């Protein structure tokens, strides 16, 4: 029996590519160049499985027309709002993801962003590397104290809880959060956290607001002009969730007007494009989507995809099936 034919859309950790190549008739993207819509469409017509990442856009149009050969999309990542899952389901395509393995590393990046923007770390490094530092002085790059401040978390899933744990037990911060569903107060207390009823309630009292909610239509532009205006004066926004959760134009306006003091961002609305106005701001720390970027986590994510597609092609339910 011939092996299922699969396409890996970007370079993956070498150990994962080796396993995929052993188990399947695997086409690797050795150049690591992003595939365009035409190439992704062709992949759906010619491969039994396509293994996309969060940077591959798979809208409904790619699933229309001719008979689709692909039977499974083994997504490398937790979020899948880059895939039109309804269109995939209509074609009988199974979609899987990789939850549970990037929690700690993403929470670490959120903490890195919070500390960096509060203590003006990005500004300081740029100044030093440019040879512009003239020495210590009392008023130089004075930032905001983190210990003892209030952090508000939007979305209290795995990553939100891990971030709360770091903030409360690592930095003595008070933690409040908003979550769509009610969280048992005893469970929240394990992370030193208290649930509030509305997003606005969180924004009103938080010195730092960190986003940990899913992307997609339901949460698109959850942080808009009205909500930036509702934030505590002098507060900071941290986003390691999805770029579309934030109305980027409204964020830029809030930063330029001083409505909020700064932002730490790891994700963007139109990745890899980052608006010039954001890149020009000293009170913004910008990272290139590094949330899960450790050797251990990226390998674990890849192996989750391997487990999902191996189960599927063996006729079993994939462990991390989305649809």
Image (cartoon, rainbow, N blue to C red):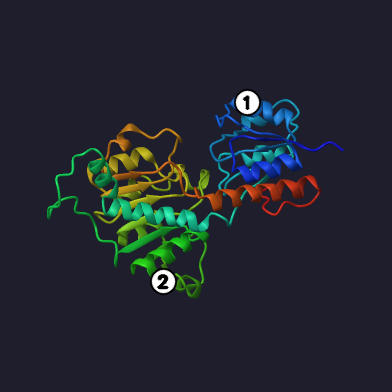
Q: Which residue ends up furthest to the top in the rendered image?
A: 38
Residue 293 on image: x %, y %: 49, 47
Q: Secondary structure at mark 2?
A: loop
Q: Nearer the viewer, mark 1 or mark 2?
A: 1
User: Badge 1: how crowded within 10 Å, few (<14), some, or many (20+)?
Assistant: few
Asked if residue 197 shows in the view, the reply is no
Quadrant showing the N terminus: top right
Residue in the image at 44% along x and 61% along y: 163
Q: Is residue 129 above or below residue 108?
A: above
Q: Which residue ends up furthest to the left in the rendered image?
A: 138
Residue in the image at 76% along x and 43% along y: 23
Q: Is residue 109 above or below residue 58?
A: below
In 3D space, how far apart are the residues under numbered discs 1 and 2 (Cα atoms)? Answer: 48 Å
For the residue pair 197 and 3, the one nearer the viewer reads as: 3
Q: Secondary structure at mark 1?
A: helix
User: CB under 8 Å between callouts 1 and 2?
Assistant: no
Residue in the image at 75% along x and 32% along y: 69
Residue 188 on image: x %, y %: 47, 70
256 relative to 316 in the view: left or right? left
**Does label 1 or label 2 sit earlier along the sequence?**
1
Q: Say which mark, if any, is on residue 192.
A: 2
- What residue is pinned by disc 1? 39
Residue in the image at 80% along x and 38% along y: 3
Residue 59 figure quarter: top right
Residue 321 on image: x %, y %: 68, 50
Q: How many marks?
A: 2
For the residue pair 304 and 12, the one nearer the viewer reads as: 12
Residue 24 on image: x %, y %: 75, 39
34 relative to 212 in the view: left or right? right
Asked if residue 111 shows in the view, the reply is yes
Q: Which residue ends up furthest to the right in the rendered image?
A: 1
């Amino acid at each position: 029996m011939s092996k299922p034919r699969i396409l890996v859309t970007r370079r993956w950790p070498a150990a994962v590519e080796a396993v995929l190549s052993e188990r399947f008739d695997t086409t690797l993207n050795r150049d690591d160049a992003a595939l365009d819509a035409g190439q992704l469409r062709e992949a759906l017509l010619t491969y039994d499985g396509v293994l996309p990442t969060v940077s591959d856009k798979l809208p409904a149009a790619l699933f229309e027309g001719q008979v689709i050969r692909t039977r499974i999309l083994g997504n490398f990542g937790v979020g899948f709002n880059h895939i039109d899952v309804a269109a995939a389901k209509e074609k009988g395509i199974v979609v899987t993801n990789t939850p549970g393995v990037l929690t700690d590393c993403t929470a670490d990046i959120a903490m890195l962003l919070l500390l960096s923007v509060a203590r003006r770390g990005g500004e300081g490094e740029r100044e030093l590397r440019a040879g512009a530092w003239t020495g210590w002085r009392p008023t130089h790059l004075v930032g905001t104290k983190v210990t003892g401040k209030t952090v508000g978390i939007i979305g209290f899933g795995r990553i939100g809880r891990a971030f709360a744990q770091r903030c409360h037990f690592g930095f003595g911060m008070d933690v409040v959060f908003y979550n769509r569903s009610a969280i048992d107060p005893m469970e929240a207390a394990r992370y030193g956290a208290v649930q509030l009823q509305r997003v606005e309630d969180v924004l009103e009292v938080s010195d730092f607001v960190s986003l940990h909610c899913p992307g997609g239509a339901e949460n698109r532009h959850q942080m808009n002009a009205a909500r930036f205006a509702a934030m505590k004066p002098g507060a900071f926004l941290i986003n390691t969730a999805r770029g579309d959760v934030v109305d980027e134009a409204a964020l830029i306006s809030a930063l330029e007007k001083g409505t909020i003091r700064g932002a730490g961002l790891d994700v963007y609305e139109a990745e890899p494009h980052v608006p010039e106005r954001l890149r020009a701001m000293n009170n913004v720390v910008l990272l290139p989507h590094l949330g899960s970027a450790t050797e251990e986590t990226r390998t674990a994510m890849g192996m989750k995809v391997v487990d999902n597609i191996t189960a599927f092609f063996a006729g079993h339910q994939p462990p991390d099936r989305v649809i």
